[in-house]
Amino acid sequence: MTTHPDPVREAPEAFPAQPHPAAASSAAAARHAAAPQATDWTDGVDTVPRADGTPEELQPYAELGLADDEYDRIRHILGRRPTQSELAMYSIMWSEHCSYKSSKVHLRQFTEKAPPSDRLLAGIGENAGVVQVSDELAVTFKVESHNHPSFVEPYQGAATGVGGIVRDILAMGARPVAVMDPLRFGAADHPDTARVLPGVVAGVGGYGNCLGLPNIGGEVVFDPCYQGNPLVNALCLGVLPVSRLQNKAAVGPGNVVVLMGAKTGRDGIGGVSVLASATFDEGSEQRRPSVQVGDPFIEKLLIEACLELYDAQLIAGIQDLGGAGLTCALTETAAAAGTGMRVWLERVPLREPSMQPHEILASESQERMLLIVEPAKLEAVLKTCEKWGVLATAIGEVTAPEPEGQPGRLLITWRDHVVVDVPPGSLVDDGPVYARPMREPADLILLQADRAETLPRPSDPDTLRETVLRMIASPNLADKTWVTEQYDRYVLGNTVLAQPEDSGVIRIDERTGLGVALSVDGNGRYARLDPYHGAKLALAEAYRNVAVTGAAPIAVTNCLNFGSPEDPGVMWQFAEAVRGLADGCAELGIPVTGGNVSFYNQTGAAAIHPTPVVGVLGLLANVADRVASGFVPRPGGEHEQLFLLGETHVELSGSEWAWVTHEHLGGVPPQVDLAREKQLAGLLAEAARVGHLSSAHDLSDGGLAQSLVESCLRHGVGARIAVPDRFEGGSMPFVFLFSESAGRVLASVPRGHEKAFTALCAEHGVPWELIGVTDQVGGALEVHGQFRIGLDELREAHTGTLPSLFGGVQPFEVTAPEALGVAADAVVAEGDTEPVAGSAEEPAMAAEVGAAEVEAAQVEAAEVGAPEVEAAEVEAAEVEAAEAADRPADRATPPVRTDRPTVVTSPAGATDQSADPTGDDAGAVAPRSDATEQPSTPDER
Amino acid sequence: MTARVGVVTFPGSLDDGDAARAVRIAGAEPVRLWHGDPQLHGVDAVVLPGGFSYGDYLRCGAIARFAPVMEKIIDAAAGGLPVLGICNGFQILCEAHLLPGALTRNQHLHFRNRDQILRIEATGTAWTNTFQSGQEVLIPVKNGEGCYVADTATLDALEAEGRVVARYVGGNPNGSQRDIAAITNPAGNVVGIMPHPEHAVEALTGPSLDGLGFFTSVLKHLVGTPA
């Protein structure tokens, strides 16, 4: 590989090395104006002088997604029509993707409502939030979406999603140390899911594994609402010494602008090709598909080279190139410093030499970074890049701000022609802002009235047993090993916990044992029923998942996946979710440090469920104290006591059970009590530190039954459970096992610690109840008086689903290639609705989609009209045109429930279930609870 | 004096830090070697770590085999230098013809990461002399191209000469012929292993401590080897 030692100053150039930008601009204009035919294309490009001379030329701004008034505003800013390159830049930077024009007015709440934090070194608006975790160390983390590309081309879409978020983390000065991936697909048995899921999983794995980043968790969720709009979110965690924090500002006039990494090609410029075909029509058929293609090897080298540059203090500023490519990086770095910039575009190393200036500016080629370097350090920077085999090229320099405190200008030439001359801040900060109309969806009242609590429930032991087996085998609750086995969770040697644990835990300091826990969660069904509380529930679940490891939650990131903001119903859902998340973070006292908005996850009029995905980061002083989710085998088969923490109510609306057994979605989601979650987290952190916990597992989708099964199967330790008296009779044992009440944890406590543990519960105000014991000899999960299911039967049900859907087979069962061919053909012939046992080939084929298939998929995507606009970072900026939008009233307060564990009003509107205790339970384990901490009677909602 | 064990970093090496940590935990001094530096810096043994050297372009290990440092390692291995190739390192050793056979795409075509039981069969090598013959160990396996293949004559010879160092037990994670997980050269100083012993050296981060035996073995071997 070569490095281009191409110091700007030595380049033959029509302009002085450090031109006064405005002067240079006018000089250029004067020069070109003197040319005989200013209205002609100059070398095939639209220059600034030409734009001056042809003010009436029609431009395809509407095709690029700019509104009439937006285009007028550009003309006003520039005092002339924009050149082709400028128009491309404004259309990108003012898109929803980059400008947050629909979400800004709402996202401000994350800043306005943020609790004070002295840990936050960088927050919203930066590439990623940075949180200090010790005197020397900080961590940075962020989650982003790559939804639409992953539908078009699952492998590369998902792979470049990982690549993009990793560069965001790298740009903050951090070494990326782990990734997570919340994924959402359509129905598990839909033929297209068999195309999308294996490709996405292979892409996440292919990129992350090759980058050497452990994948420590995530989600795999199936719901028909994601059929045409799968959600591929990717989270990255990085660690940095506090002193190594990097900045994106292009400070220091005279500093060199260096483009580092992969060559620039025609990928990811679909929008711009519209422009090209509309204006030129010369060979537009040659345009490449706008699929970004990742090369994790180059990114790995980029990471190592950047870290070496940081440590040697060789760079003044850095920004990654992601969505909007060079346009975004140049304007953001200059705008952040208030400086100007002078760029020689022909110096950008190209994959395709025929690329035009507007294409170079809009290209989203992967694995690139923009560096700001002092001239004296340029040689050392180029040398380091050369050592790692990374291309690095000086393409421009930082120029001084305008006189009288005005920011500098971005001046870009291409072969001596001025193609761009703009104030960089006008692209970054002065974009349009909309307070879009919002209206509660008309169907919501009916939806909320249709409660799942009225559905018929299992009320005899046999049906209950069947329900347990059916639920743990359902796609959303089934074991996800088929997916997670494709990810490296060991690399870097600091993974303390990874999937299927509630949180990933990473050691960040080998010397002290300091570590962090991370969890990402979301529940689109809850958010559909109530976006405000749905967002809070997602936050509560991620918070609790971090807390069960013993970690103290300290910061939040989020990825907000929604339909079209132009639909008032969707906009209302978005506003409600943001409000819920901001309120929730304020209540929990942990700040949102950054995130991402993804709109237009919509096919025709059908939007996805509103899906706020929330990531919570927690801190563990010593990772050796972490608590895992599985029941632990003890020497001699000693039993441990099982405690259920929190309160169980009759809360089935939006539950996994209602969906799996009745295909029902209605009612209101479970209550969320963040004060209670906070108490629970305090209890768990202290109990973990003093060793009261053998295991702790969050209760969420699928309720207690799901958590029991997962904890049993983790290490093959069974359990014997006694249903508390309050849940005896009728369908109440079912409610005990499948209610999805929030704020609950299943904990196993070693012998001798019970008293101290329950005392600690009382101290923290957390209701507790002894519900049984672990049983490593019995080899079964037994619910006394109800059913007994052997661990083998549970395992078979729990682990069989994904392999049968997606064709995972044991390698030693792989048949000969010719037989495979037959199997694959047969699958195609049958339309692939049946499980594909025996064929390992099918998913891999999907993972290696050929170019033709990509194109076909794009056409398909265009036909279904599912454009996705993704915003690159959550930024709550000042908004000028924001008008107070009508805020719908908070939802009616649900039935009052006291927070304290005193007895609460009993079921209102109970149906066929009475909670009459039916005599004494003669089991070996009698449920027992502290009189003062008696959980409330389950109430119907 | 502490043994010095070199760990090579190629562009795209990923488990080099982990291998160095394992060497340190075993009680030796890890020495980082750079692919472009044709010097062994006086190390007593070498580990070729896992990863995707040179992006796995062309074939896994095919380019790394020509790295300047590899020329020296190939020479030194002929002279008895203990060399352990883990995962991508195993692939490099095969490409360098220090070990026979090749590693191909997993038969099920997926990358697979799981905790794997291995049976140690050859305990006379420089890297396995602290194990008992037939001992079962738990070591993470993680690869996309770990399917060991060789012609029948080679496989027969490996078995006849006791050069199958370890086999997969309780399920073959990648379709390797005859469940082969690790092999050695005739002298027993060069070992290639597909699973990752460096990921099983700490109770906190690994499924077991069984991997440590590979690194303590080389120390025992070096003590017994006249300088």
Image (spheres, coloured by chain):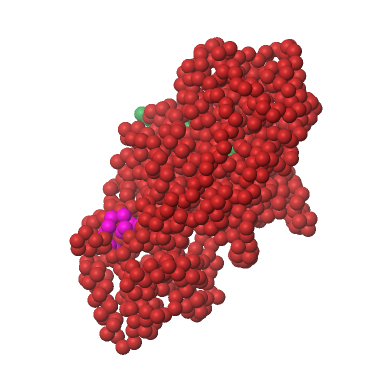
Q: Which residue is drawn at 38% across and 28% down?
A: A512
Q: How many labels does the image show?
A: 0
Left or right relative to A313: residue A821: right
Left or right relative to A889: residue A347: left
**Residue A689 shows up from this direction:** yes
Dividing the picture into quarters, in which one does residue A237 lie? top left
Residue A332, magenta (yes or no): yes
Q: Residue at x 73, y 23 (%)?
A: A914
Q: What stretch is highlighted in magenta?
A: A329-341
Chain A drawing hue: red
x and y, in percent, of residue A266 in the image: 48, 67
Front-most of residues A536 and B36: A536
Q: Residue furthest bottom?
A: A36
Dividing the picture into quarters, in which one does residue A817 lie? bottom right
x and y, in percent, of residue A487 in the image: 56, 43
Q: Which residue is drawn at 51% across and 13% down?
A: A759
Q: Is residue A832 above or below residue A393?
A: above
Front-most of residues A138 and A647: A647
Q: Is residue A752 above or below residue A352?
A: above
Mostly what secondary structure, the magenta segment? Answer: helix
Front-most of residues A552 and B104: A552
Letter of the chain shown green in the rendering: B
